[in-house]
Image (cartoon, rainbow, N blue to C red):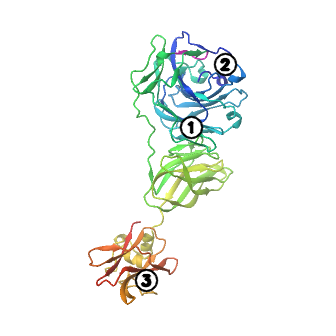
Amino acid sequence: MRFRPILLLVALIAGSIASSFAKDYKAGEIQSKQAFLYGKFEFRMHCAVGSGMLTNFFLYKDGSEKTGAENRWEEVDIEVFGKDGCTIWQSNIITEDYNGNNITRREGLHYGTFNAWHTYTLEWTPTSMKWLVDGNEVRNFTDRFILDRLTSPERICFNIWAANVASWVGWFDTNRLPLYGFVQYVRHYAYQSGSGTFSSNPDFNDEFANLDNFYVSTHTFGENYADFATSNIGIINGTLCMALTTAAAPGLATSVPADGDTPPPCDPVVIPARIEAEDFCQKSTPPQPETCDEGGQDMGYIGAGDWLTYKITVPSAGTYRADFRLAAMTNSPQFALEKETVPDSNTYAPLATITGASTGSWQAWQTTTQQIVLPAGTYKIRILALVSGFNINWFEFIAPPNPFASWATAWGLSGANATTTANPSGDGVTNLWKFASNLDPTRASSATLVSGTGTSGLPFISTNPVGGVPQLKAEYLRRRSTPGLVYTVQFSDDLATWTNSSAAGTVTTIDATWERVVVADSSVGAPRRFARVLVNWSN
């Protein structure tokens, strides 16, 4: 950034940006030789801590500081404050219109400090301007009154400088000098007109082997304690270094901070589990955490279009009961629950739409329940608000009911007698087989299924002639819609090597719970042939 007319509440005048002259402090700035209209700008930057100074990325139309209609000011900023531990930054759009439509907003980071390595992204299209930090969308600006005034290609600029406006950046703490900002790389991905997307490969990718793609600034302006100097810009081990120093001791840092100061990983939560709403991976701004009357925090200040992401691991696919703890003063809460389509893609597909009820207070909590199908795997989910005006305390995924456990309980089995391998009746037929064959586990019974009409019993193996040649068949009962329960039909010539049958068989529905399956052997007329049915329970 060169000069903040809307922040300082003064008008730009000719000559406010002048050639470099002797000030007590030196700063560093570069501007790309190439200019860009629209696109995705991505860079990785490490900012400096110190009251009164800023580390910045900005897009700037060359000549904006000059007078004349053709020099209308056009600028977009990411300005990181050194004050307050380097934990806040400001997103700006500056145009020639000074009637309150220039938009500045202070942003924050819900973890750590900007005096660390972070990846920043600015996505500029004709209809929106998005700011992101570490993939987290912080702001999405769509005011066409302003966006329509950003019509010119703009240069990519980085700088570090000290402002003489204490009300904005704090008093300049000269005792902290020298200070340094670092940039690993900067990339531009072209906007694909009409599609609303960006190219997958950058058309500008500078990893700072040198400064051939940039001009080094040597100017200053009235609000800057320092003048920009070539001595305070350079490359250290493939990293751009920008220095803020005294005039008596200009120059660069001697080393580059290690890139280990990344945000904490978003560890997945293994489902089933309860997830506190404030334990998000990423979010829009708002929502914001607030004190919750039920203890801890909840996420409030939610508006339509706001979102939060969470990472989960689902060991087994299934239909889970999802409980959402919600509160709303007047509106009925409504949001989409979405699943990441590709890991780390930031694209999502809907899982369900959740609608709650107005509770009459921001802290009057009510649980809304819905059945949701979750695929197995590790992935992010996103809560995307469809309306404004509700709070979320927590949400919980409860495992699908275990059909075997419910069956064992219904038969009065408990403890060791309730396991799949137990044989409470002592007849040699395990609980799993009786569960799979509709038999009473408390009574001795090894009865086989009555072919064609039976509704309980173990598999029935028989032969039928096919063209006068015998063919083996396996007939068995199968539980319907019971995830984790798998029946497998196998055939063999020698009882040593068994082959799974690939035939779907003939299936006859008995009732809502059971069906009869008949699978015929693919081998006909073999002198010796054996069949068996296996049952496996993985839930």
Which residue type carries mark 2?
Lys
- Quadrant location of the C terminus? bottom left
Question: Bounds of the magenta span?
Answer: 222-228
Single out the mark in the foreground, 3 or 1: 1
In this figure, which residue is indicated by the disc labeled 3? 456
Count residues near mark 1 (Cα–Cα under 10 Å), then give few for <14, some for 14-19, many for 20+. many
- Give the quadrant of residue 208: top left
In this figure, which residue is indicated by the disc labeled 1? 190
Q: Position of residue 487 (x, y in %)?
A: 40, 73
Q: Residue furthest front?
A: 467
Residue that appears at 55% across and 31% down: 88
Q: Position of residue 311 (x, y in %)?
A: 48, 49
Residue that appears at 51% across and 14% down: 25
What number of labels is visible?
A: 3
The answer, for residue 51, to whether it is visible in the render is no
Does residue 373 sit above or below 533 in this rendering? above
Q: Is residue 232 left or right of residue 139?
A: left
Q: Position of residue 64 (x, y in %)?
A: 65, 22
- Label whose residue precedes the other's in the sequence (3 or 1): 1
The answer, for residue 300, to whether it is visible in the render is yes
- Quadrant location of the N terminus? top right
Single out the mark in the foreground, 2 or 1: 1
Does residue 352 sit above or below 414 in this rendering? above
* Magenta highlight on residue 244: no
In this figure, which residue is indicated by the disc labeled 2? 66
* Magenta highlight on residue 223: yes
Q: Residue furthest bottom?
A: 468
